[in-house]
Amino acid sequence: MAELAGWIWSAALAREVVVPEQVAAEVSRVGDEASRALTDSAFTIAQVQPHPLVVPWGLGSGETAVLSFAKSQRQFVAVVDDLAARRCASSIGVLCRGTLGLVLLAKTRQLIPSAADLLAELEQSGLYLSRDLVEYGLGLVGETPGD
């Protein structure tokens, strides 16, 4: 459920969601709700060549593809949680947002009733966010953990 929610937020928060083939392949291997949502949705699947400024960072294929696409298509914002990927994005001038940022944006746009509940669900399904970061982010939208 939580992974499917991620795809839904992305679609609700953006005019267009482009998923690099490398990410689609990673998601499809899992065979969960997110992979079904990806194949049943209106997301654009894109072929992406690694950008020469991203390759030296030695990121995973998904992060490399996302940042390479965003570097070549400047109107897009990369969605990455990996700290090294976020550092790479900053270094090469790519705007990025993480899962926490998407949750907070969805909350401020009243697309979800509780950021705290959704973050708890995401953490239960494997997303790691530091407790301090979660508390800080929830404070920005007037919530506390467990609200």
Image: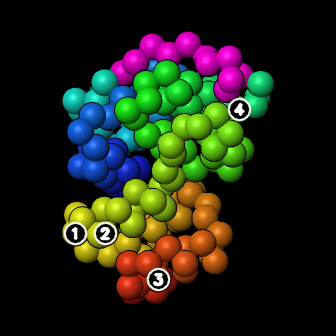
Residue 122 lies in magenta, yes or no? no
Among the two numbered marks 1 and 3 on one chain, the one whose residue lies closer to the N terminus: 1
Q: Secondary structure at mark 2?
A: helix
- Looking at the rendering, the stretch of residues picked out in magenta corresponds to 45-55
Q: Amino acid at mark 4?
A: Leu
At 28% across and 30% down in the image, what residue appears? 43
Q: Amino acid at mark 2?
A: Lys
The three-letter code of the residue at mark 1 reads Gln
Q: From this viewpoint, is residue 62 visible?
A: no
Is residue 86 visible to the viewer in this orientation of the structure? yes
Marks 3, 4: nearer the viewer: 3
105 versus 90 height, above or below: below
Secondary structure at numbered mark 1: loop
Q: Residues within 10 Å of mark 2 (few under 14, many from 20)?
A: some
- Residue to which mark 4 is pinned: 59
- Callout 3 secondary element: helix
Mark 2 or mark 4: name the one nearer the start of the chain.
Answer: 4
Which mark identifies residue 139? 3
Main secondary structure type of the part rendered in magenta: loop
Could you tell me how far apart the alpha carbons at marks 4 and 1 are, in whole angstroms?
A: 34 Å
- The amino acid on which the numbered mark 3 sits, given as a three-letter code, is Gly
The residue indicated by pointer 1 is: 110
Is 67 situated left or right of 140 in this image?
A: right
Q: How many marks?
A: 4
Percent x, y of residue 97: 49, 50
Quarter in which the N terminus is drawn: bottom left
Numbered disc 4: secondary structure: loop
N-terminal-most mark, 4 or 1: 4
Q: Looking at the picture, how far across and down is residue 46, in whole percent?
A: 40, 18
Residue 51 vs residue 100, the one in the foreground: 51
Mark 2 near mark 1, Cβ–Cβ under 8 Å? yes
Q: Which dot marks residue 107?
A: 2
